[in-house]
Amino acid sequence: MAETADTRTPAQIEADIKRRREVLAETLDEIGVRVHPQTIIGDAKAKVVANIDHTVGRAYVQVNRVVSEVRTQFVDEEGSLRVERVVPVALLAVGVVGLLAFSGKRRKG
């Protein structure tokens, strides 16, 4: 291999060495920050929070979808209640509450 002669002056070489040392020092500082336990813990917390936010967001969308589907069963396109569907459900709910109340009284008595 042919060697090329270094045509830089001693001052240029010293300046280049100084610049490279500064870059290396910055890189080492950055690595130190990245591997610091507080940084690692903070990154882990951020990932957990992001995953929770994502899961909560998906759950919110699912609940909204279900509520909308149930709402369409009991409300027509104009926003009026569908009495023919609301009354049987209300009667069923009253019956269940009545049974629970009656069975609670029987156990005590």
Image (tube, grey):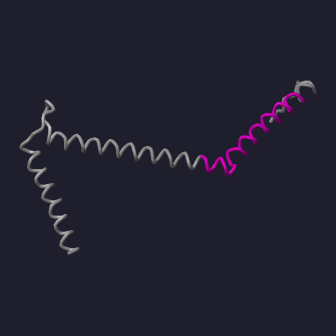
In this orientation, which residue lies closer to the viewer: 41 or 96? 96
Which x, y percent locates residue 100? Answer: 19, 64
**What residue is shown at x 50% (from left), y 46% (from top)?**
49
Quarter-of-image position of residue 6: top right
Instruction: Give the answer, above or below, for where 9 lies relative to 97.
Output: above
**What residue is shown at x 65% (from left), y 47% (from top)?**
39
> Magenta stretch?
14-42
Instruction: Give the answer, above or below, for where 18 lies relative to 100.
Output: above
In this orientation, which residue lies closer to the viewer: 4 or 68? 68
Quarter-of-image position of residue 17: top right
In this orientation, which residue lies closer to the viewer: 70 or 52? 70
Which x, y percent locates residue 98? Answer: 15, 61
Quarter-of-image position of residue 4: top right
Which x, y percent locates residue 48? Answer: 51, 49
Which x, y percent locates residue 26? Answer: 76, 37
Instruction: Give the answer, above or below, for where 9 lies relative to 23.
Output: above
Magenta stretch: helix, strand or loop mostly: helix
Number of numbered discs overlaid on the protein picture: 0
**What residue is shown at x 83% (from left), y 36% (from top)?**
21
